[in-house]
Image (cartoon, rainbow, N blue to C red):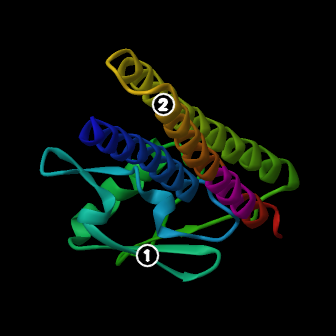
């Protein structure tokens, strides 16, 4: 019985960790006014007939807070990289100097900052839903174990432990959102 409970707690913690790491990845993609190579994370370049991530065909870096520089491994890829960035719908206008592709990241307007903060809030809410879903499935499993002979007192104790774990993860989601919102709203 104890092994089942330990497994249940580990599985619940893993599910909550996954929800949190998904939120982290989503928040990284939301720009906060500064140029960041991760802004181009989803860009796929046509490379010898296969869609390949931009990071695998070039070196992406940020020489300053408003510029992203893309240095392709092969100069023949420059037009393909420009086309991929335009097709990704990121709102960037790539330029090339014959050697590399340069993206000038425009400053965010107040309205755009609010929209991005709303998007971050939405990602936070999605993560919280994931955490609560993990809690619900753990509580359902505890009820099944209660029907299989787990004492009522132990069941309540474990339910309290799972609720405490849920509260901790919800607090982590909120903290990540507040930090990202401050990043976005800082001019």
Magenta stretch, overall SS? helix
The residue carrying pointer 2 sits among few (fewer than 14), some (14 to 19) or many (20 or more) residues within 10 Å by Cα, namely some
Left/right placement of residue 11 relative to residue 135 reads left
Q: Which is more toward the observer, 184 or 13?
A: 13
User: Which mark is on residue 147?
Assistant: none
Residue 55 painted magenta: no
Is label 2 in a helix, a strand or a loop? Answer: helix
Q: Which is more toward the observer, 166 or 47?
A: 166
Asked if the residue at tag 1 contacts the one at tag 2, i.e. Cβ–Cβ closer than 8 Å, the answer is no
Q: Position of residue 27 (x, y in %)?
A: 58, 54
Q: Quadrant of residue 75?
A: bottom left
Q: Can see residue 93?
A: no
The residue carrying pointer 1 sits among few (fewer than 14), some (14 to 19) or many (20 or more) residues within 10 Å by Cα, namely few
Q: Where 142 sits versus 103, above or below? A: above
Q: Residue furthest bottom?
A: 63
At 47% across and 44% down in the image, what residue appears?
A: 16
Q: Which is more toward the observer, 14 or 103?
A: 14
Q: Quadrant of residue 5?
A: top left
> Residues under labels 2 and 1: Cα distance?
66 Å
Q: Position of residue 131 (x, y in %)?
A: 53, 38
Q: Residue furthest right?
A: 110
Q: Quadrant of residue 31?
A: bottom right
User: Which mark is on residue 155?
Assistant: 2
Q: Residue furthest left?
A: 48
The quarter of the picture where the N terminus appears is top left
Left/right placement of residue 87 relative to residue 149 reads right
Q: Earlier in the sequence, mark 2 or mark 1?
A: 1
Q: Where 152 sits versus 173, above or below? A: above
Residue interval drawn in magenta: 171-180
Q: Position of residue 119 (x, y in %)?
A: 68, 42
The residue indicated by pointer 1 is 97
């Amino acid at each position: 019985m104890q092994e089942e409970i330990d497994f249940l707690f580990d599985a619940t913690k893993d599910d909550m960790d996954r929800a949190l790491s998904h939120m982290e990845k989503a928040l990284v993609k939301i720009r906060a006014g500064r140029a960041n190579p991760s802004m181009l994370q989803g860009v796929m370049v046509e490379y010898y007939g296969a869609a390949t991530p931009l990071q695998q065909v070039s070196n992406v870096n940020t020489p300053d807070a408003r510029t992203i520089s893309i240095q392709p491994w092969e100069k023949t890829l420059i037009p393909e990289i420009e086309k991929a960035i335009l097709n990704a719908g990121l709102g960037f206008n790539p330029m090339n100097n014959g050697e590399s592709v340069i993206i000038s990241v425009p400053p965010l307007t107040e309205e755009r900052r609010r929209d991005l903060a709303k998007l971050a809030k939405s990602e936070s809410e999605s993560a919280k839903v994931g955490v609560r879903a993990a809690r619900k499935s753990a509580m359902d499993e505890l009820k099944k174990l209660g029907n299989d002979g787990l004492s009522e007192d132990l069941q309540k104790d474990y339910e309290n432990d799972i609720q405490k774990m849920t509260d901790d993860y919800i607090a982590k989601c909120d903290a990540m959102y507040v930090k990202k919102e401050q990043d976005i709203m800082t001019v």
